Amino acid sequence: MSNAKESSVLGPAAVFQLIDELREEMALPGGSGFQSYVARNRKMGPHTYDLWITDPVAEAWYNGSERHDTRETSWCLAHIREGMKIADCGAHHGCFTVVFSKAVGPTGGVWAWEALPKNAAVIEKNLTLNQCTNAIVRPFALGNERKRMPLLASDSGNTVLARQDAQETDETDTIEVECVRLDEEVARDIRVDFIKIDVEGSDLQMMRGAQRVLSQRPIIDLEIHNFLYQDPRATLSEMFGMLAPLQYVYSVLPSPDDGAVQPAGWNIDLSELASYYNPHVFCLPVWGQTAQSAGKRRRWW
């Protein structure tokens, strides 16, 4: 991999300051007083859908253009098949949830977890709007234990785990939400085929609470928030230590917005991965001779 960018840890308030700066650069209105509307005929891969746009961040993310094709969405759709069971962990307003629902068809199913109650309500509206009857919304945060937990929420619908060093601003509030374990949420008779993980810095805690589901070796789209980790290298070490026995081959997207998906092979260089600000790691389970062949390789980058 190349063009590594040194990561730095930002507190929650700094994250929301970046969001506010982005809004100003794009000349977007503030969150309060925003008039909700439906963006019609959005497209991702072969799928067409409508989306409720309820705040400025959603407008920037989901209505900037008619097509929502990115390297991440292309990778996901290339690996999803009809009939799959998908866990959408950190679903925001349900853009991926709707597309996943269409991709797996009536014999498949999608479960969407979203920590912020008002976001979960928007997902429900988007599922109804698109007649997605094979998808269910779970309005909970995901972690390693069932408890009430504090989240720092912005007025535009973004959340991060509130830490002791977090400070509220005029644009943020600390709210309490219910946190659950994915292993308790998913019935034992359900095999999860695909997981999208985008839980805003709670990635390690979510994975700790999902070890039974992960042991089923689903395909994984893992968004990594190095800029929110106190110790990115140590956090990544534990995360990929969980995956190591499960025989995955990895690919890395260094940045959500730019760069090509790069094959990482059987072993990930965690020091290099930690140097990226907000990468994705795509995880494919390998089987039989493929696994044996991959296991002989020391490292692909």
Image (cartoon, rainbow, N blue to C red):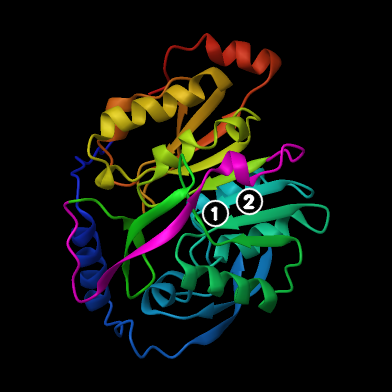
Q: Secondary structure at mark 2?
A: helix
Q: Nearer the viewer, residue 165 or 220?
A: 165
- Could you say which disc has been placed on residue 77 in the image? 2
Question: Magenta stretch containing residue 173, yes or no?
Answer: yes
| Residue 161 sits above or below residue 209 on the image | below
Where is residue 120? Give x, y as percent.
53, 68
State the CA–CA distance, disc 2 to disc 1: 6 Å
Give above or below for 188 relative to 12: above
Quadrant of the image occupied by residue 67: bottom right
**CB under 8 Å between discs 2 and 1:** yes
Residue 1 visible in the picture:
no
Residue type beneath disc 2: Leu
Q: Which mark is residue 73?
A: 1
Above or below for 140 versus 260: below
Q: Say whether residue 231 is magenta.
A: no
* Residue 248, disc: none
Residue at the spot x=22%, y=64% of the render?
Answer: 18
